[in-house]
Image (cartoon, grey):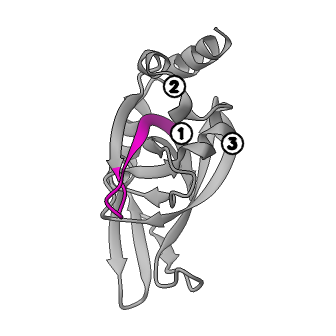
Amino acid sequence: MTEIIVKYNDVPPSGHPNVTLHLFHKGKLKHSVVCLVDSGADCTTLPSSMSTLIYGFNICAMAVAFLKRIGAQMNESECFCGDRIKSVKLPLLISFDNYTFPININWVDNPNAMPLLGREDFFECFRVQFDELNKQVLFCPNQERIEQNKQKYDFERINDLIMKLKTD
């Protein structure tokens, strides 16, 4: 099994591992983002302002009725500083290294939110080992789990609803 080795960042904030995720919507690459690997984060978190690049609208600015119809989960997230902020969780197709699969994204209503790679979905698809001595993270893919994640979400339904509801 192939390991993916990610060295810790040597530029500020130094001493932290970062990975690049490629974000897809309707089968097309829409954006790439560098995320801090955060084993303390419950789920992958991105600023909702970035959702405009993916969907064409800010997901946190949409009406609750719209969000419910597309199956999004409305939440309040707690920032590391203790503040509570509105967030919307919606699955998105991502790729990391040579692997493409869906994960839940927690879009937070804070344009300055640091993109975080969290445990839900992503860490389930890899055995993740932090190697502090060598300042690197080892990701060992679990192909079976990646395939299970691909079956977990109905993107065609979500995308159809987004297109229909956006035009209503």
Tell me the CA gap for discs 3 and 2: 15 Å
The numbered dot on residue 93 is: 1
Residue 83, above or below 73: below
Amino acid type of disc 1?
Leu
Amino acid type of disc 3?
Leu
Q: Residue at x 37, y 31 (%)?
A: 74
* Dots 1, 2 in contact, CB < 8 A: yes
Identity of the residue furthest to the top in this view = 168
State the residue position of label 3. Answer: 29
Q: Residue at x 64, y 8 (%)?
A: 168
State the residue position of label 2. Answer: 155
Q: Residue at x 53, y 65 (%)?
A: 19
Tell me the CA gap for discs 1 and 3: 9 Å
Q: Secondary structure at mark 1?
A: strand
In which quarter of the view is residue 141 placed? bottom left
Instruction: Determine crowd level at label 2: few under 14, some 14-19, many 20+ residues with C-alpha closer than 10 A.
Output: some
Upstream in the sequence, badge 1 or badge 2?
1
Position in image of residue 83 (x %, y %) = 35, 55
